[in-house]
Image (cartoon, rainbow, N blue to C red):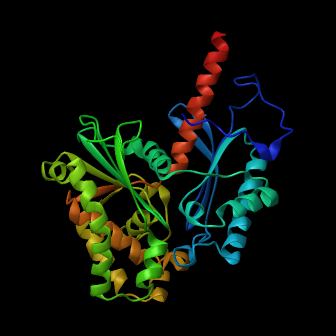
Amino acid sequence: MVAYVKPRWRRDVERKPEGGRGRHALTFAAIDLGTNNCRLLVARPSEDGFRVIDAFSRIVRLGEGVSETGALTAAAMDRTIDALRVCAAKMRRRRVDRARLVATDACRRAINGTEFLDRVAAETGLHLEVISTEEEARLALRGCAPLFASDKRRALVFDIGGGSTEVMVLDTDSDCGASKGKSSDGSCWISLPFGVVSLSERYGRDVMSRESYAAMMEDVDKRLAPFCARNGIAGSARDGELQMLGASGTVTTLTGVHLDLPRYDRSQVDGAYLGFNSISKISDRLRTMCCEERASHPCIGSDRADLVVAGCAILEAMCRRWPVGQLRVADRGLREGILLDLMVAAAQGAQRRAQA
């Protein structure tokens, strides 16, 4: 069970009675510090889940160079701490009561990850925890679950990150074959040891040849093949039992490009469907562009221009292995999973106190 993290940045906070007259509901926050992005959500419970009252997202590239040197660079740490200061200020302004602040692949891998988190605590007051790949997959799955279609027996969910890529399959009729790679909610998962940052560093960031792009896809497929065989995913795709759901910047970016949005609009992207033919056409077009051309699209921009093609290769490898024809797009994931965990824990705690 995931416990909430007390708001250490407000040690002298006056606790608000839950449900007290004249008081709003508890305010919750979630931070997801990944290899590429720093993201914050602040929300309060509502009848249909929760209502977001504040948010923040900035590309910080914390994991830039980690795959080559094994360490976080001074520049990357400085960029990230600047973003986390913004998060801390928003949390104070919104008077957050309970939060969970997590770091993922870059801090897991970096030899100086612990020293960096100590510096974050000292300079921002935020105490981040480094979570395992299994916990990362569980939270992403929990956050995306509301988008599952009810007419499919299995759901495959993936999150293409900066330094790693998590892939999960949920099958309520199977024990997943082995305890290894199985989470407590019955899903099977794999964490691929690469993402858009690490693959871009290996294969290049600008115009990419068809051969280099195919090599990237082959790298991804070699990792997916044993996972696919172990869990019988190809058979489920062939039999029409499998749905796919993508929760990552790559998928939401390509959806914005597909919809030809004048600027990114979450309300049009989250929950949309993206066909595999469209993915292939957009990916091939982006592969042949230089970074400046990609950056000119309002749904890509300069921050993603040099990384999006690597994301396309990971995405296309999954589409080719599991040709279900379309995927559902989720502009949600780990942060939403954290918030749901925190709110359930708070409600259970209030119920226990009421019964005592």
Residue displayed at 36% across by 42% down: 182
Image quadrant occupied by the C terminus = top right
Q: Nearer the viewer, residue 135 or 91?
A: 135
Residue at the extreme right: 12
Residue displayed at 53% across by 30% down: 47
Q: Nearer the viewer, residue 66 or 80?
A: 66
Image quadrant occupied by the N terminus = top right
Residue displayed at 75% across by 58% down: 118
Q: Is residue 293 above or below residue 113?
A: below
Q: Is residue 303 above or below residue 176?
A: below
Q: Nearer the viewer, residue 71 or 140?
A: 71
Whole-percent x, y for residue 246 in the image: 37, 57
Whole-percent x, y for residue 260 in the image: 39, 71
Whole-percent x, y for residue 153 in the image: 23, 40
Whether residue 9 is visible:
yes
Whole-percent x, y for residue 240 in the image: 16, 48
Number of marks drawn: 0
Q: Would you say 181 lies left or right of 264 here?
A: left
Q: Would you say 38 lies left or right of 139 here?
A: right
Query: Quarter-wise, where is residue 151 in the image?
Result: top left
Q: Nearer the viewer, residue 88 or 257?
A: 88
Q: Would you say 261 lies left or right of 326 here?
A: right
Whether residue 299 is visible:
no
